[in-house]
Amino acid sequence: MTARLASLFLLTALLAVSANGKDKKKSSLPEYVLRATTVRVVVSPDAGEPLDHPMANANARDSVEKALMQWGRLRPVMDEAESDLVIAVRTGNGRMVQPTIRGGPIDQRPGVAQSTDDSIRIGAQQGQAPPLNNPGMGPQIGPQNGPEMGNTVGASEDTFEVYRGSVQYPLDSAPVWRYIAKDCLREPGVSAVEEFRKAIAKAEQAQPAKKP
């Protein structure tokens, strides 16, 4: 009986090692992220603009879009229906609670004109953009209701979250990848985009080699 139990323990240990080896080969990102070619960058709907820096989130969104353009793998678009992924950004200022303003003209974005060292992007929003999350799940704050002031509670550092695009209410699901760090949305560098690039490269390396 003792020898039999020892054999069972040895077999269990070998299976555990084999399972761990297989886990290491699994991609840390879903296949749809690795296949994505387009992305829409938005300000998180629950993020208010700080009163002492009212364009902080809009500037962060622009910085992320420019960094994506320089990377070249994902093409920023303005139409959610065309985007394989949605990236939501939100700036932090070192405080968990801060006075902010939401809604009104500050949240509108009729068009965009951006340039990097080797590319130019010009685009316009076609019609009313669809909501990023279910409008029936919380209070409505937007241009149609006018600006509102209040205190916003959230991460004290910059937040970069990746969601699946081309679906209804993409931000109602959990983000597939998230990065939170101080000034990670700030130029130059925009370290959040660089870390996402590394995550994709690592996930691709973990994929099994394709048979010829």
Image: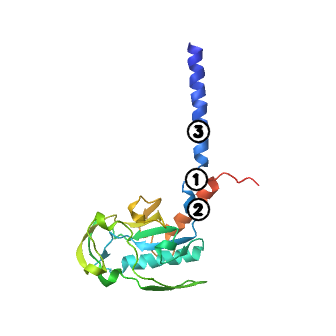
Residue 88 shows in the view = yes
Label 2 or label 1, whichever comes before in sequence order:
1
- Image position of 123 (left or right of 100): right
Numbered label attached to residue 34: 2
Residue type at numbered disc 1 = Ser
Numbered label attached to residue 19: 3
- Image position of 108 (left or right of 16): left
Numbered label attached to residue 27: 1
At horizontal 59% and vertical 83% (from top left) the residue drawn is: 119
Give above or below for 208 relative to 37. Answer: above
Residue 181 shows in the view = no
Mark 1 crowd level (few <14, some 14–19, many ≥20, 10 Å Cα): some
C-alpha gap between disc 1 and disc 3: 15 Å
At horizontal 61% and vertical 37% (from top left) the residue drawn is: 18
Viewer-nearest residue: 172 or 81: 81
Residue type at numbered disc 2 = Leu
Label 1 or label 3, whichever comes before in sequence order:
3
Looking at this view, name the residue that lies furthest to the right: 212
Whether tag 2 and tag 1 are in contact, CB under 8 A, the answer is yes
Q: For mark 2, give the secondary structure.
A: helix
Whether tag 1 and tag 3 are in contact, CB under 8 A, the answer is no
Q: For mark 3, give the secondary structure.
A: helix
Label 2 or label 3, whichever comes before in sequence order:
3
The location of residue 64, given as percent across then percent down, is: 48, 74
The location of residue 160, given as percent across then percent down, is: 44, 66
C-alpha gap between disc 2 and disc 1: 10 Å
Mark 3 crowd level (few <14, some 14–19, many ≥20, 10 Å Cα): few
C-alpha gap between disc 2 and disc 3: 24 Å
At horizontal 58% and vertical 53% (from top left) the residue drawn is: 27
Q: Quadrant of the N terminus?
A: top right
Residue type at numbered disc 3 = Ala
The location of residue 161, given as percent across then percent down, is: 44, 64
